[in-house]
Image (tube, grey):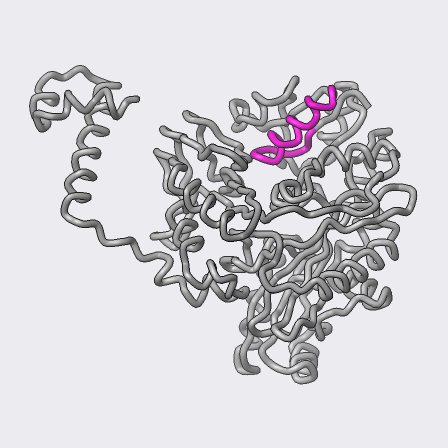
Amino acid sequence: MKRVLIANRGEIAVRIARTLRELGLEAVAVHTAEDRLALHVRSADRALELESARGYLNAEELISLARSAGVDAIHPGYGFLSENAEFAAACATAGLTFIGPPAAAIAAMGSKQRARAAMAAAGVPITPGGDARSLDEAKATAARVGYPVLIKATDGGGGKGMRLVETEAELESALERTRSEAQNAFGSDAVYLEKAITDARHVELQVLGDQHGKIVHLFERDCSIQRRHQKIVEETPCPVLTPQTLAKMGEVAIRGAASIGYFSAGTFEFLLAPDGSFYFLEMNTRLQVEHPITELVTGLDLVRAMISVARGDKLELDQPVRRGAAIEVRIYAEDPASGFLPSPGKITLLRPASGPFVRDDSGVYEGAEVSASYDPLLAKLSVWAENREHALARMRRALQDYAIGGIRTNLAFLARVIADPDFARGDYDIDFVGRKLDALLAEPNADAESRVLLAAASAVAAQIEAEKSTSCEPLQQALSPWVSAQRSALKS
């Protein structure tokens, strides 16, 4: 393996390219015309343009470009084609190494209903539920497991195609809406029902296996801080998970992975009930967005491990060790004050957080244009410390230091989540954001002095922007007298 095509974009493509360079492998990026100036293109050794309107989802074009460029392997990252069994199989047919699990394992976990059946057969505890192919069947399933229930897209993921139903009166309309959303997002309107576990936490377990039958787990991540089923904050260790429950989770996850012949990196997602019982949700047959915090506490490079496994190497991990605590937040180009609507545009200022044990996985740069065509994730900010208390303090400081201008972001919203007293105590579940949304959206009241300083800063910023396009002297004179004295400080 000498040359690897990264079938993705954004921060994950940048992150993969870095490990490829460390390994002395050539990184080949792909991009649409819209992405030709993107950071992942600048981070690669070579870049190829995608001409199809389907862009990063066109498996045939990706494989054709890879073969024409003399590529040996393809890393899919996450999203797009990363969990597409047909793409993995097509890579093998074309003589390209797919840096991920075997196509059969992806297919086995690709349908949530098939995955539930396979894991139940392997002895993995699953959430009570069943089919919902018709309204009558959905009613029967819900009556059997008891309300509240979740309607879920069979072929869904990423928090889409999911709806909570409290009573039978809500079931019909919720079923229709979820089917429509599933069809639009995943090309299939198939759905099923699960019992909604109240006051639960979303805890996932990282697994890693080689092609020689060895599988290990790399501990858990608590992903309960979510908005509309989309994770926004993750941490490890989980504040409430006992060593005994972790051991049981690890045992069933390894058994489940072995039952489908799994190798490479993968993640088992569970619901953890307040009484310590846990239930299988799904398996993600790819690298997770939140993998950096596992890397921070284990010292492992999961992308490097995936490449090693794809080459056929044996895992040398006998007893993985976890040290300290790590937290990750996802920084989005979105406006929390406007219902979290995406905020595309040009980034006019970018000052990432830095310092000891602070990691910024970013896919943008100052001057970059944020597109409305893709997921609005800009960066992932992660911190490590010797314990959770210090990790929280480090994250609070890092969020204060992080600055992005030109677009709206969720930085302030994330800071309020991290500062929340309940979160600081580790007292939260998957409904945390929903319960506290009004408080988390509330802007702090600024005192008189702060308001004056903010107004002054706005005036200086306005003049700097004006000077970029005009040298109009009357405008300079119209601004307050101290502007010229402050201009250089703001520019710096």
**Image coordinates for residue 12, horizontal then vertical, percent:** 61, 35
Q: Is residue 294 above or below residue 445?
A: above
Residue depicted at x 58% and y 23%: 41
Where residue 481 sits, quadrant-wise, is top left
Q: Which residue is outermost to the right?
A: 212
Q: Indicate the quadrant containing the N terminus: top left, top right, bottom left or bottom right.
A: top right
The spot of residue 189 in percent (x, y) is 66, 61
Work out which residue is located at the far front of the displayed protein and give it: 386
Judge whether residue 284 can be spotted in this image.
Answer: no
Residue at 68% x, 30% y is: 6
Question: Magenta part mainly helix, strand or loop?
Answer: helix
Looking at the picture, tell me which residue is in the foreground, 270 or 87.
270
Q: Which of the 4 image quadrants contains residue 316? A: top right
Tell me where residue 400 appears, x and y as whole percent: 38, 41
Q: Nearer the viewer, residue 85 or 485?
A: 485
Whether residue 231 can be seen here = yes
Residue lying farthest to the bottom in this orientation: 143
Q: Which residues are magenta?
A: 6-24
Establish if 99 lies above or below 159: above
Q: Position of residue 188 (x, y in %)?
A: 68, 57
